[in-house]
């Protein structure tokens, strides 16, 4: 997978690419990241990438020319790449969009700044606008990093087998069960005894119930789409009874 990142802050991506999952993918030759500086595609002395909005109003808008020139320089064919604009107006990113994008050969990610990007870029050059949630950011760079990490780890071979099995936990649509490690007793706080019992079936039942309980209490919105079997539904009925 090639990630081309169009940004006025190419250095923003330096240290995140030097460690973690993206670095592993890069070293294994499965991922390459190409930060493209939009200022390299300006032709004035001040390397201007923004201008005042037509119609008046606060703030500045990203000019279309540098973005279009940067896109042209990549010589992408529409068949082997998707162009994504990071924007608070986009579809809200989630695990199923990450999975959808992980099968692409190349993702071009445009990071907006200022009050936004000239709409003609969206209308004529972009395949998908993505938001990472309902909050204000000064630019799309941090959002682009989130997308790269979530997509990158789904590319076959990027994670070790142990980690890739753990993907399945969020993919079945509910929250994780709580985890504990040594010591058994810490400042008087005990680990749930069932986890020390050696009874693997009992442990699996306890974990499923705790996962359902956490989801019901914290993220009931997830239960509508989750893959639940009849035993899960029975457990949920019990949990709803005991709910404070
Ligand atoms: N806020 N997702 C949430 C975003 C965002 C702001 C962005 C881009 C994606 O750019 C300013």
Image (tube, helix red, strand yellow):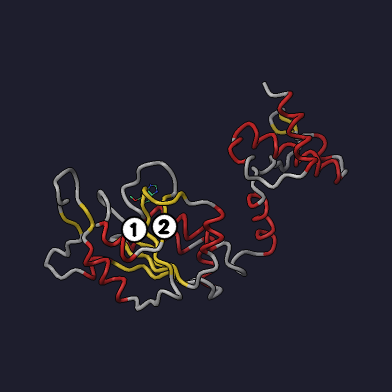
**Position in image of residue 24 (x %, y %):** 55, 67
Q: Is residue 43 above or below residue 61?
A: below
The residue that appears at 39% across and 66% down in the rendered structure is 83
Question: Outermost residue, top direction?
Answer: 244
Residue 187 circle label: none
Query: Under tag 2, what secondary structure?
Result: helix
**On the picture, is 130 further left or further right than 48?**
right
The residue that appears at 63% across and 31% down in the rendered structure is 217
- Which of these two is toward me, 59 or 16? 59
**Ligand 1 under 8 Å from disc 2 Cβ:** yes
The residue that appears at 39% across and 67% down in the rendered structure is 108
- Which of these two is toward me, 40 or 151? 151
Query: Under tag 1, what secondary structure?
Result: strand
**Position in image of residue 62 (x %, y %):** 23, 57
- Tag 2: Cα neighbours inside 10 Å, few (<14), some, or many (≥20)? many
**Ligand 1 under 8 Å from disc 1 Cβ:** yes
Q: Which residue is mark 2?
A: 144
**On the picture, is 158 further left or further right than 231?**
left
* Tags 1 and 2 touching, CB below 8 Å: yes
């Amino acid at each position: 997978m090639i990630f081309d990142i169009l940004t006025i802050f190419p250095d923003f991506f330096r240290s995140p690419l030097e460690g973690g999952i993206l670095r592993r993918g890069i070293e294994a030759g499965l991922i390459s990241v190409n930060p493209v500086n939009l200022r390299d595609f300006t032709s004035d002395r001040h390397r201007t990438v923004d201008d005042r909005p037509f119609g008046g109003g606060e703030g500045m808008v990203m000019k279309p020319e540098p973005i279009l020139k940067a896109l042209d320089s990549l010589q992408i064919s529409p068949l082997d790449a998707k162009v994504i604009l990071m924007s608070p107006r986009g579809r809200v990113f989630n695990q199923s969009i990450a999975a959808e994008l992980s099968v692409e050969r190349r993702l071009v990610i445009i990071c907006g700044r200022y009050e936004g990007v000239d709409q003609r870029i969206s209308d004529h050059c972009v395949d998908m606008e993505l938001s990472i949630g309902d909050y204000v950011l000064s630019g799309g760079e941090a959002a682009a990093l989130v997308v790269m990490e979530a997509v990158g780890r789904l590319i076959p071979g990027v994670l070790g087998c142990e980690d890739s099995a753990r993907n399945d936990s969020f993919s079945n649509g509910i929250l994780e069960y709580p985890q504990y490690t040594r010591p058994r007793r810490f400042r008087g706080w005990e680990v749930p005894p069932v986890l020390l019992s050696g009874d693997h079936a009992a442990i699996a039942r306890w974990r499923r119930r705790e996962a359902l309980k956490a989801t019901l209490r914290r993220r009931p919105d997830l239960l509508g789409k989750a893959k639940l079997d009849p035993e899960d539904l029975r457990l949920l009925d019990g949990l709803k009874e005991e709910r404070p």
